[in-house]
Image (tube, rainbow, N blue to C red):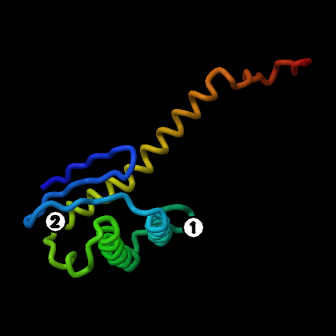
Amino acid sequence: MKPKTELPVFNPTSRVQLAGGCIEVHELKWPDALSFFNKLRDQAKGLVNDKGEICMDANKLMEAIGDNVELAAWLVEKSTGMDAQWIEQRSLSEMLDIITAALEVNIGIIASKIKNVKSRLVSATAGELPPKSSPTSQPSAT
């Protein structure tokens, strides 16, 4: 079943319906969130060459897939509070729904916060920016 995400202001939670009941997916704790994003960054670095282009090396792609499976299991464990034994009992579709919900909750928080900060900065600086000077304009005497 498709996860239903509710993103309240604090402690966003998503409920995912499974064959044996409902599971709640929570926002990561700060140390876990830092670890998650560091792992994502490290994985992305392995797929990009020195020019910033995505490498299509088969060995690197297979390694990234393996790393992502481990990262997904870690994310499910941390965001649900369930252990590895519980995770091993889930079906593919259940795991995909839980992973989707965990990503929606945790990546969604960052995306919404970035948008909020951008909006606040734009509002705070509206009308307060000095006028742009053109290359031919004289400097102000003030």
Question: Is 82 left, or right, of 51 in this rendering?
Answer: left
**Percent coordinates x, y for residue 94 in the rendering:** 16, 65
- Residue at 53% from the left image edge and 61% from the top image edge: 52
Query: Hey, what amino acid is under mark 1?
Result: Asp
**Percent coordinates x, y for residue 48 in the rendering:** 49, 66
**Percent coordinates x, y for residue 113 in the rendering:** 47, 44
Q: Is residue 97 above or below residue 43?
A: above
User: Quick one: quadrant of the C terminus?
Assistant: top right
Task: Return the mark for residue 94.
Answer: 2
Pointers 2 and 1 in contact (CB under 8 A)?
A: no
Q: Residues within 10 Å of mark 1 (few under 14, many from 20)?
A: few
Q: Earlier in the sequence, mark 2 or mark 1?
A: 1
Task: Return the mark for residue 50.
Answer: 1
- Residue at 23% from the left image edge and 62% from the top image edge: 98
- Residue at 33% from the left image edge and 78% from the top image edge: 66
Instruction: Name the outermost residue toward the front.
Output: 10
Asked if one can make out residue 123 in the rendered structure from this viewpoint, the answer is yes
Query: Hey, what amino acid is under mark 2?
Result: Glu
- Residue at 27% from the left image edge and 46% from the top image edge: 6
Q: Nearer the viewer, residue 117 or 67?
A: 117
Mark 2 → mark 1, Cα distance in angstroms: 38 Å
Give the quadrant of residue 91: bottom left
Question: Is 101 left, or right, of 71 in this rendering?
Answer: left
Asked if one can make out residue 54 in the rendered structure from this viewpoint, the answer is no
**Percent coordinates x, y for residue 137 in the rendering:** 82, 18
Q: Nearer the viewer, mark 2 or mark 1?
A: 2
Provide the secondary structure element on which disc 2 rests. helix
Provide the secondary structure element on which disc 1 rests. loop
Task: Return the mark for residue 121.
Answer: none
